[in-house]
Amino acid sequence: MDNFVVEVKGVSKVYGKTIKTVALHELNLGFKTGSFNAIIGESGSGKSTLLNIIGTLDRPTKGEVIINGVSTRNMSKGRLADLRNETLGFVFQFHYLLPEFTALENVLMPYRVAHGKADKESQKRAREILNLVGLEKVENNLATNMSGGQQQRTAIARALMNKPKIILADEPTGNLDSQTTDSIYQLFRKINQELGTTFVIITHDRRVAEKADRIVEILDGRVSLDIIK
Amino acid sequence: MKLAFDIALRFLKSSKGQTILIVLGIAIGVSVQIFIGSLITGLQKSLVDKTVGSAPQITVAPQEDGDFILDPQAEIKTIKAANPEEITNLVAVTQGPAILKTPAESTTIILRGFDWGAAQGIYKIADRVVKGELGINENEVIIGKDLSKNLNVAIGDAIEMITPTGKTGEFLVTGFFDLQVKSLNESWILTNNGTAQTFLETGEGVSQIEMQVNDVFAADEVAMDVEKRLNDETLIVTNWKEENVALLSGLSGQTASSLMIQVFVLISVVLGIASVLAISVVQKSRQIGILKAMGMHNPKASLVFLFQGFLLGILGAFVGIALGIGLSWSFATFVTNPDGSSLVPFYIDWVFIGVSAGIAVIASTLAALIPAIRVSKLDPMEVIKNG
């Protein structure tokens, strides 16, 4: 129990006021520090809702999310923003890079959100991460002048910038071809092993899921399968 | 702050067409403000200058008609001391009505005598002499060019005048003047102070003391200072403003209408910026959403848009100043009277331009407030859910 870096306790999510749609049914789930987890499930099963709630982007209707041992239930919007900035890294199906900025500037963005100006050290770190994801050659390209795979790698590099404890990825390779998908997962594994970052990844791809330490399947807002290898 | 500013700058740079359009919108607003403001101010300045620039703006005279100021030099000193910074061009004038007789006809004139040197300040009399010269010696006079025509008088002619008390005198015409006001050119005869004092029998006394002030619109306040300083109930102090109420109300009407135009221009600029930035919030919602997901606080996200408004305002103000000055200059240069002089003189009031630019910047920033509030309410979930 103590080892959970993130934990959801009795989390329910209901959408709509007159016609209620229950997306999550009192879910209890914890992810261990440094673990590599896959969440699978059909579309509409509630897996993205779960990930957004874990990521504090969405609030649960009932229950609570505990990150780093601290409940987020009563945190203000500002405090949650700081928590996301310091502890969480997001990778979405769409890269959401800022097209007005270069790859390097995009990677630096989470640091600048926290500190305003990017000092030399942070720039060095951003370059190292870009190196890690194999983008050192295009670091000065605008986000719009990169291939889909490069954009997604930049988004991953950005997620790593503030040394987050947890990376939350929602179908990060959904828009990519299978070769690029493979290389992205190898990259995730490498980061997981080298930096000890916890990964929670939503994927459709069973092949990908099978490489994870743990597979959680969500069905109709409930955990239907939980395999720990 | 720095990040919000940088993002604002990038947003503006990335949509250049939109930025140029909105900057042009602000610039045209500012330039119209500067142009109209300068035009009206220039017009008023030249109007006031033409009306009272070569006339006394404050006059001190005895309360009773026919009385004289007996010690003008002492009074001049007192008057000057009332407001030494504002009061200039003091001159003592001895004047009185007389009948001018020529063999053919006679006409009523006003004989005005003053020290030519002192009168130069107000009347620029040396420049107004169109023929001949000033009458320096006793019994020498200059007459208006229209009067000379009416009475067929030439330089070197002698004219005869009779005072209301019946005293007669003969005077030598040494020149003609043109004060550019027909009624004065027909009715004034100017001479040196000594001649007037002798003929009008005022002794050492003068009829009135005239002066100008540096700020013509402060003439009423300065007149009050003078009145207080003199503290003499036998003297009456008048100023041009109380004698030109119609002109002043015309001027203030003009000011009010130019202000109205400027206010409406400002409102249209504000609406333009607000609507373009509101569209830009929609365009940039993805970026804002992800920045918030990354931990950017709401006020900072709003600041991005406030900075955009501020930057647009500054850019627009600069371009607008250049345009406005160019427009005013062109108007002054190319819209001319038949004689080639400007219809309205080119006039630049940097304080007014500064205020216009400042208002544009503040208004642009405030216009960004509505989009900024929208941004602060933007939920990153909406963006991420809908892609």
Image: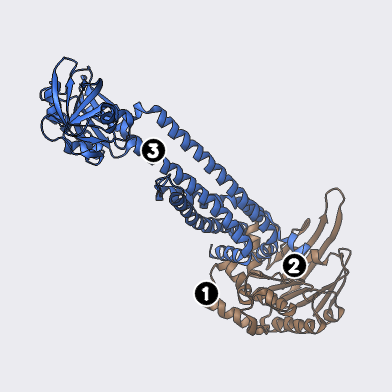
Chain colours: A brown, B blue
Residue at position x 77%, y 70% from top? A30
Which chain is home to disc 1? A
The part of the image, by quadrant, that contains residue B226 is top left
The part of the image, by quadrant, that contains residue A98 is bottom right
Secondary structure of residue under mark 1 = loop
The amino acid type found where label 1 is placed reads Asp
The part of the image, by quadrant, that contains residue B161 is top left
Quarter in which the N terminus of chain A is drawn: bottom right
Mark 3 vs 1: CB contact within 8 A: no
Which chain is home to disc 3? B
C-alpha distance separating marks 3 and 2: 81 Å
Which chain is home to disc 2? A
C-alpha distance separating marks 2 and 1: 34 Å
Please give the residue where the numbered disc 2 appears in the rendered image: A7
Q: Is residue B310 above or below residue A35?
A: above
What percent of the width, then of the height, locates residue A211?
A: 81, 82
Q: Is residue B15 above or below residue B180?
A: below
For label 1, the crowd category at 10 Å Cα-Cα, with few meaning under 14, some 14 to 19 and many 20 or more, is few
Residue at position x 23%, y 35% from top? B176
Secondary structure of residue under mark 2 = strand
What percent of the width, then of the height, locates residue B297?
A: 62, 60
What percent of the width, then of the height, locates residue B48?
A: 36, 37
For label 2, the crowd category at 10 Å Cα-Cα, with few meaning under 14, some 14 to 19 and many 20 or more, is many
C-alpha distance separating marks 3 and 1: 62 Å
The mark lying in front, picked from 3 and 2, is: 3
Residue at position x 27%, y 26% from top? B187
Please give the residue where the numbered disc 3 appears in the rendered image: B47
The amino acid type found where label 2 is placed reads Glu
Q: Is residue A179 above or below residue B353?
A: below
Please give the residue where the numbered disc 1 appears in the rendered image: A119
The amino acid type found where label 3 is placed reads Leu
